[in-house]
């Protein structure tokens, strides 16, 4: 494990004399933080701390997960504070996953506080503590750098008295980085404005030569690099191609119970994390799903895994960087990640303090389309940018995000991404004033598109590289090390036998049945769109007459019922009796209460008999009356062509109404073939309930969208 030097430090001399750096004090802090009375520094840890404390220039530490990067910056920050220096500013995308590190800092007497989106109620207290100089380490997300209040109340206050600047997960700075966070681009200008001799530490577990060169251009000049070994001798890696979901579910149910210890099962989508967790729970395995939208549940789930109270967390990349469990025994990927860098980062969670651990990658046929969607949607298109800029040009006083949604047929995430990336350009063609976006005098430069095209090409190349990895029969660790520009050397691997691709065929039958019987919940909408709401029906604000939580038989791209739904809608012009029977079984398992006493459906002028025919046959088998109570008053656009919530809601508002006449009063089963935005079901339920029906229970054949 050696160090590479990019040249002389460029610092204006050592901040402290060599005698001021006491190894005994640094070791004392390490032992307090680790709770290990005989702990010693790992290779390069002491050198990194000494480099920072003595002011020997800017430093990039590239060390594998579990090496102890957080101890370097907390100990260096503490020593600088004890020498009379100012606080440390730590910029990290992982604040919600740094609870263990912050606890360790507290044991060393380091007061570390955070400002991020999940602790808004405590921001003012943190700001006041910073103003009183009572904070040793302030941790922020990169997005805080763009926040005007943070710049005014905190950043300007501490910028000139910083003792240390730390950039965690520094690969995010790079256009080449696998987890590109746009707001990291603000760091370049910030660092150029700081004193050249300010100690600066950048850390990452994974950076190839291209990323390191990119980081040197932003964090340098004269960025010294301490690069550790990439080999993980405790980790046995293997890949298995199992194209169908049912095959991978069966494999997991067969092999996970036989594995010692606990682990992580990674999926590409939230929906897959939820479904895999439901399946394994049905096989009596203690697992939980883990993903970004769980908010306050996430710490409890992490602790359950740390305490081995669950066999595994079935997780998206929300449990990627930042989670530290040294005795994690296995990492299994349900689908192939998009890059070697991302895969090494995730699989490297296993086996840090074990002599034997497993990393198994299961490859499925759907992963290609999922990854292509992630790649192609990472940047706005030229047309999307032109639409946003043209819209702002026509509004002299600017427009809010909500107003842009009303005027543009673009999805909210696409508009938000376009605004965020344009605002981060230098010079920026747009700026946010309060809640409104406005044009500036600057024009969008070609470099924006060149960067987007370069990164898109790179990510497609990385995807192809991962498919090469999947095809390997041996040499998996060597492949990863070479792909990360490391030297494989003499590699050792644990003596574990590889897990077979085979599984009990009875589990395949059970998994197939599970997929056919695993409906998706449809959450009811709670608010009408903002602005003027729905003009035709005069609806604004909170939805008083909502649908009840509904069910969908499948996702449109699922391998179970999806092909039958597509065949019925686009080729046969009639849904099969098999889908009727599947929905009958779904209703019987669902058992909504109060139980529906009649059935109706969403009408269509393009396919006037398709859904009514299906709903009528379903009602007949259920023994319920069928009534056509909703009508289309005008064709309108196809709902799938409406890109954002406001456009979708107004499109439905123009075309849907209640038929004149008496309406059955009991609870009703509302049938449709597809659901995406949920606005059709929302307005249909409001119309039915305002007309005198009971509770409205939506039931659809398939959920559309890009999440599968």
Image (cartoon, rainbow, N blue to C red):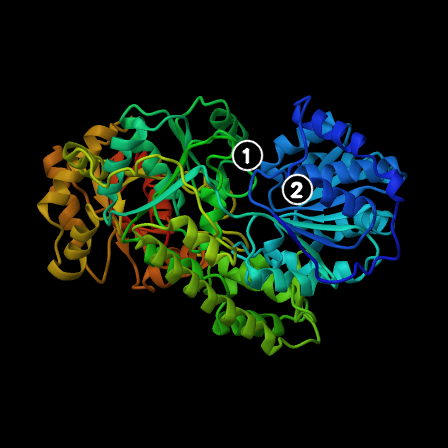
x and y, in percent, of residue 458 in the image: 47, 66
The residue lying at 60 percent from left, 58 percent from top is 182
User: In this view of the protein, can residue 337 be seen by the observer?
Assistant: yes
Task: Give the side of residue 353 with respect to residue 71, left or right.
Answer: left
Q: Marks 1 and 2: in contact by CB < 8 Å?
A: no
Placement of 488 over or under 220, stated as above or below:
above
Marks counted in the figure total 2
Q: Which of these two is toward me, 525 or 131?
A: 131
Label 2 Cα neighbours within 10 Å, binned few <14 / some 14-19 / many ≥20: some
Using the image, tell me which numbered label, if any, was put on residue 116: 2
Placement of 44 over or under 636, stated as above or below:
above
Placement of 172 over or under 501, stated as above or below:
below
The residue lying at 32 percent from left, 32 percent from top is 278
Task: Give the side of residue 390 with respect to residue 430, left or right.
Answer: left
The residue lying at 44 percent from left, 46 percent from top is 491
x and y, in percent, of residue 134 in the image: 84, 34
User: In this view of the protein, can residue 534 be seen by the observer?
Assistant: no
Q: What is the distance, in whole Å, between disc 2 and disc 1 at their CAs? A: 20 Å
Task: Give the side of residue 630 with respect to residue 317, left or right.
Answer: left
Q: Which of these two is toward me, 654 or 433?
A: 433
Using the image, tell me which numbered label, if any, was put on residue 669: none
The residue lying at 55 percent from left, 47 percent from top is 229
| Image depth: mark 2 or mark 1 in front | 1
x and y, in percent, of residue 611 in the image: 19, 51
Task: Give the side of residue 342 with respect to residue 694, left or right.
Answer: right
Disc with the residue nearer the chain's start (2 vs 1)? 2
x and y, in percent, of residue 357 in the image: 41, 34
* Element class at badge 2: loop
Q: Quadrant of residue 235?
A: top left
* Element class at badge 1: loop
Placement of 295 over or under 635, stated as above or below:
above
Residue at numbered disc 1: 324
């Amino acid at each position: 494990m050696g160090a590479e030097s990019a040249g002389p430090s460029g610092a204006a001399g050592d901040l402290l004399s060599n005698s001021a750096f006491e190894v005994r004090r640094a070791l004392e802090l390490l032992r307090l933080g680790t709770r290990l009375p005989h702990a010693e520094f790992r290779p390069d840890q002491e050198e990194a701390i000494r480099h920072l404390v003595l002011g020997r220039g800017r430093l990039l530490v590239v060390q594998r997960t579990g090496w102890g990067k957080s101890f370097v910056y907390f100990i260096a920050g503490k020593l600088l504070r004890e020498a009379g220096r100012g606080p440390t500013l730590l910029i990290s995308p992982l604040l919600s996953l740094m609870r263990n590190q912050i606890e360790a800092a507290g044991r060393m007497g380091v007061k570390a506080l955070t400002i991020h989106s999940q602790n808004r109620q405590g921001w003012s207290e943190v700001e006041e503590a910073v103003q009183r100089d009572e904070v040793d380490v302030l941790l922020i997300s990169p997005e805080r750098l763009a926040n005007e209040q943070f710049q005014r109340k905190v950043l300007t206050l501490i910028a000139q008295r910083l003792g240390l600047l730390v950039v965690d997960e520094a690969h995010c700075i790079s256009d080449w980085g696998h987890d590109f966070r746009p707001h990291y681009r603000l760091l370049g200008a910030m660092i150029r404005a700081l004193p050249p001799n300010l100690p600066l530490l950048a850390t990452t577990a994974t950076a190839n030569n291209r990323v390191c060169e990119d980081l040197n251009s932003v964090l340098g000049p004269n960025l010294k690099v301490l690069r550790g070994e990439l080999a993980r001798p405790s980790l046995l890696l293997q890949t298995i191609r199992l194209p169908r979901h049912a095959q991978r579910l069966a494999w997991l149910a067969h092999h996970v119970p036989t594995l010692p210890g606990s682990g992580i099962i990674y999926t590409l989508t939230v929906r897959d994390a939820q479904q895999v967790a439901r399946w394994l729970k049905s096989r009596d395995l203690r697992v939980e799903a883990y993903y970004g939208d769980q908010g306050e549940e996430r710490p409890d789930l992490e602790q359950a895994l740390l305490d081995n109270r669950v066999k595994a967390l079935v997780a998206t990349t929300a449990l990627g960087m930042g989670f530290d469990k040294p005795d994690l025994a296995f990492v299994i990927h349900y689908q192939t990640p998009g890059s070697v860098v991302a895969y090494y980062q995730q699989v490297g969670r296993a086996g840090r303090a074990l002599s034997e651990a497993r990393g198994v990658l299961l490859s499925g046929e759907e992963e290609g389309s999922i990854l292509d969607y992630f790649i192609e949607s990472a940047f706005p298109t030229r047309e999307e940018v032109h639409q946003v800029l043209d819209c702002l040009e026509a509004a002299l006083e600017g427009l809010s995000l909500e107003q842009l949604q009303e005027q543009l047929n673009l999805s909210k995430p696409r508009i938000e991404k376009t605004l965020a990336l344009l605002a981060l350009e230098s010079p920026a063609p747009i700026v946010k004033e309060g809640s409104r976006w406005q044009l500036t005098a600057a024009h969008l430069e070609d470099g924006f598109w060149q960067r987007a095209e370069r990164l898109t090409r790179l990510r497609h190349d990385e995807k192809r590289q991962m498919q090469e990895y999947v095809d390997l029969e041996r040499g998996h660790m060597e492949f990863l090390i070479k792909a990360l520009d490391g030297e494989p050397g003499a590699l050792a691997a644990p003596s574990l036998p590889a897990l077979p691709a085979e599984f009990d065929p009875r589990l395949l039958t059970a998994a197939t049945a599970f997929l056919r019987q695993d409906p998706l919940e449809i959450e009811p909408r709670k608010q009408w769109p903002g602005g003027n709401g729905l003009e035709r029906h005069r609806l604004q604000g909170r939805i008083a007459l909502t649908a009840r939580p509904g069910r969908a038989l499948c996702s449109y791209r699922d391998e179970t019922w999806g092909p039958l739904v597509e065949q019925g809608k686009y080729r046969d012009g009639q849904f099969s009796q098999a889908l009727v029977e599947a929905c009958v079984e779904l209703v019987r398992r669902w058992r909504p209460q109060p139980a529906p006493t009649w059935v109706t459906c969403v009408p269509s002028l393009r396919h006037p008999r398709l859904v009514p025919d299906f709903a009528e046959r379903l009602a007949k088998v259920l023994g319920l009356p069928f009534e056509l109570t909703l009508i289309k008053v005008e064709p309108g656009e196809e709902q799938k062509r409406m890109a954002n919530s406001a456009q979708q809601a107004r499109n439905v508002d123009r075309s849907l109404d209640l038929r004149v006449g008496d309406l059955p009063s009991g609870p009703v089963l509302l049938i449709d073939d597809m659901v995406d935005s949920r606005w059709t079901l929302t307005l249909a339920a409001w119309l039915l309930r305002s007309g005198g029906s009971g509770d409205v229970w939506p039931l659809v054949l398939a959920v559309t969208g890009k999440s599968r």
